[in-house]
């Protein structure tokens, strides 16, 4: 039986594999079994309609030898409908919960970013209220003149937070859609990495981490939003889990079919279990959990999904365990592979 339509009542569509023209057969033949010449496939077929409890089933078969055989096949579908409905409802509830969780996470992250932005503004412009707009403007000018260094740092931080907002909106949209519109163009690959890396130089500096990025002038065809946002999550994770007073090295490698961006660093050690689940949604490594430095466990998951959406991929090669300052580290490698088209 190669076509099947299942409906619950008048609104709950469980499955629909019928052409639009097939709907006419439902209306014409009603609750009956018939042999017809199919106007679409131009062959003889058996059609049937059954209604039981809350379900209506219409079927069209090109391989039922007898009406009795066709009825038996249709009855078999009737028997499994309750289980199909139960499974579908469970999937629907799961999808709703997942969507709600993503929305709540987006709101939480945006509120957090907004709080950071507000704090940065108050660092250079403490709350100063006056009824006179000109006085407020003059106060702002004087304040900026006397706190020029602090203002420069805050502007740098604000640029980072605005970029973070863009990431949140882009990822929220991408996570809801498996099919996305890509805009591949040729970019200097080192510039793509540097633009994202610049946002985190302050974080690496605070941990005394030396960042070394290889010289490179190659141009690669890629979807900028996908790659840059994936890099954001990878580098953000690096700022949290890299060993203080160590080195983060970034290199570029052109192979026959792919172009690689490779990160080398001493960062938290991954157990065998971690290696199996490092790209799972909501998973955090054992050492990150033990030291209570883990977040929501979404960084590597989102990085991989964003890269996969544009045909790229990522692998994590975990190094051997070593103990430094009471914490477990490994010399880890992250490879991003962008297909050469």
Image (cartoon, helix red, strand yellow):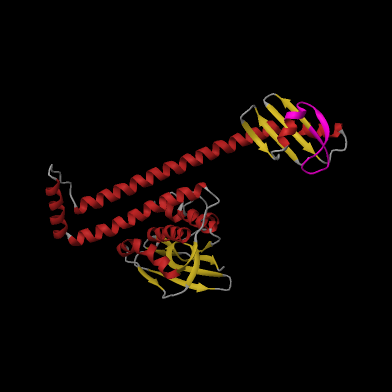
Q: In which quadrant of the rendered view does residue 229 lie? A: bottom left
Residue at position x 25%, y 60% in the image: 153
Compare residues 18 and 83 and report the one nearer the observer. 18
Magenta stretch containing residue 43, yes or no? Answer: yes
Magenta residues (range): 27-47
Q: Is residue 232 above or below residue 262?
A: above
Q: Position of residue 118 (x, y in %)?
A: 26, 48
Question: As drawn, which residue projects farthest toward the top?
Answer: 53
On the picture, is 313 further left or further right than 158?
A: right
Q: Position of residue 42 (x, y in %)?
A: 81, 43
Residue at position x 73%, y 26% in the image: 51
Q: Position of residue 275 (x, y in %)?
A: 53, 58
Question: As drawn, which residue projects farthest toward the front?
Answer: 39
Compare residues 296 and 67 and report the one nearer the observer. 67
Magenta stretch containing residue 21, yes or no? Answer: no
Q: Quadrant of the N terminus?
A: top right
Q: Quadrant of the C terminus?
A: bottom right
Count of numbered labels shown in the rendering: 0
On the picture, is 140 further left or further right than 165?
A: left
On the picture, is 19 further left or further right than 123?
A: right
On the picture, is 171 further left or further right than 120?
A: right
Compare residues 97 and 242 and report the one nearer the observer. 97
From this viewpoint, is residue 20 visible? Answer: yes
Q: Position of residue 227 (x, y in %)?
A: 47, 61
């Amino acid at each position: 039986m190669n076509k099947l339509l299942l409906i619950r009542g008048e609104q709950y569509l469980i499955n629909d594999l019928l052409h639009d023209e097939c709907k006419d057969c439902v209306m014409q033949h009603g609750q009956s079994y018939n042999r017809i010449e199919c106007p679409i496939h131009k062959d003889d077929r058996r059609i049937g309609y059954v209604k039981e409890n809350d379900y209506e089933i219409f079927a069209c078969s090109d391989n039922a030898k007898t009406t009795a055989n066709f009825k038996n096949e249709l009855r078999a579908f009737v028997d499994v409908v309750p289980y199909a409905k139960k499974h579908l409802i469970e999937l629907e509830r799961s999808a709703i919960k997942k969507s709600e969780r993503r929305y709540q996470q987006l709101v939480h992250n945006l509120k957090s970013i907004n709080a950071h932005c507000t704090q940065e503004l108050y660092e250079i412009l403490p709350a100063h209220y006056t009824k006179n707009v000109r006085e407020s403007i003059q106060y702002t000018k004087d304040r900026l003149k006397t706190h020029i260094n602090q203002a420069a740092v805050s502007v740098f931080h604000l640029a980072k937070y605005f970029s973070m907002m863009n990431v949140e909106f882009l990822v929220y949209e991408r996570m809801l859609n498996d099919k996305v519109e890509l805009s591949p163009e040729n970019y200097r690959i080192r510039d793509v990495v540097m633009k994202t890396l610049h946002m985190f130089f302050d974080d690496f500096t605070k941990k005394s981490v030396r960042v070394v990025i290889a010289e490179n002038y190659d141009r690669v065809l890629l979807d900028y939003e996908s790659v840059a946002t994936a890099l954001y999550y990878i580098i953000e994770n690096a700022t949290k889990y890299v060993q203080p007073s160590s080195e983060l090295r970034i290199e570029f490698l052109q192979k026959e079919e792919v172009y690689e961006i490779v990160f080398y660093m001493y960062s938290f050690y991954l157990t065998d279990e971690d290696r199996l689940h490092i790209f799972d949604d909501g998973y955090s490594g054992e050492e990150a959990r033990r030291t209570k430095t883990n977040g929501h466990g979404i960084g590597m998951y989102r990085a991989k999904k964003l890269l996969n959406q544009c045909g790229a991929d990522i692998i994590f090669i975990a190094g051997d365990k070593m103990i430094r300052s009471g914490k477990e580290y490994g010399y880890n490698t992250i490879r991003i592979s962008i297909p050469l088209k």
